[in-house]
Image (cartoon, rainbow, N blue to C red):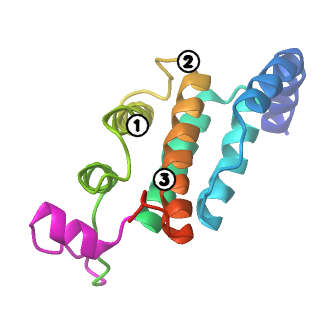
Amino acid sequence: EALEESLAQRVIRVLPRAQKRLLDLLRISKEIGASTRARDFLIRVSRSYLLSFDPECVVMCRSALEAQFDAEISNDDCIRVLKKSLNTSDNSQPLFNLYDKITVARELGRITPDIESFAHEVRKAANAVVHQRPVVRCDAITIVKYTVAVMTTLGNYRKNADNGSGKGK
């Protein structure tokens, strides 16, 4: 009960700020060619951001990126570009981490150096929250914007490839 009461009090305190945060989200929202799994994480990003759960928001941003990179960058792409053998877990699942997939996306021309930098900023911010302190050392909306920019770029690449244009092939 004490936890529920504490959460309720926090929600009441953040309601005025939630209105501004909703406007922030509306300004940066656009059609993102996100995978279903990535969209599920983006919903959690929005909820966390609106309720001022900034550390959770940043971690969900990283999760959304990881889901999108997993959908867009295959293990074969990673093996070919990184020129290293396939790492496997105990249950024989291939493992290439987010850092690897960001690198491969850049090498394949699917993201620009600026977008690569955004992806790494999201990755590093979430790593700091998870592995150091559950405190966000940057503005959460910046991490959300970076996440949207990266996902939009990946989605546009796929959309162009699917439409047969020169980009994305």
| First-in-chain label (1 vs 2) | 1
The numbered disc on residue 56 is none
Q: Residue at x 36, y 31 (%)?
A: 114
Q: Which element type, helix, strand or loop, lies under badge 2?
A: loop
Q: Residue at x 90, y 22 (%)?
A: 12
Q: What crowding class fits label 3: few (fewer than 14 Cα within 10 Å), some (14-19), or many (20 or more)?
A: many
Number of marks present in the image shown:
3
Q: CA distance from mark 2 to mark 3?
A: 23 Å
| Residue annotated with mark 2 | 139
Q: Is residue 127 above or below residue 38?
A: above
Q: Are marks 1 and 3 in contact (CB under 8 Å)?
A: no
Q: Position of residue 33 (x, y in %)?
A: 62, 57
Kindly report which numbered mark, 1 or 2, lies closer to the viewer in this rendering. 1
Q: Tell me which segment is drawn in magenta.
A: 73-91
Q: CA distance from mark 1 to mark 3?
A: 10 Å
Q: Nearer the viewer, residue 163 or 102?
A: 163
Please say whether residue 103 is one of the residues in the magenta stretch.
no
Q: Position of residue 146 (x, y in %)?
A: 51, 33
| First-in-chain label (2 vs 3) | 2
The residue type indicated by label 1 comes to Ile
Q: Is residue 80 above or below residue 66?
A: below
Q: Is residue 77 above or below residue 20?
A: below
Q: Residue at x 54, y 35 (%)?
A: 58
The reply to whether residue 17 is visible in this rendering is yes
Please say whether residue 81 is one of the residues in the magenta stretch.
yes
Q: Position of residue 131 (x, y in %)?
A: 36, 37
| Residue annotated with mark 3 | 154
| Residue annotated with mark 1 | 115
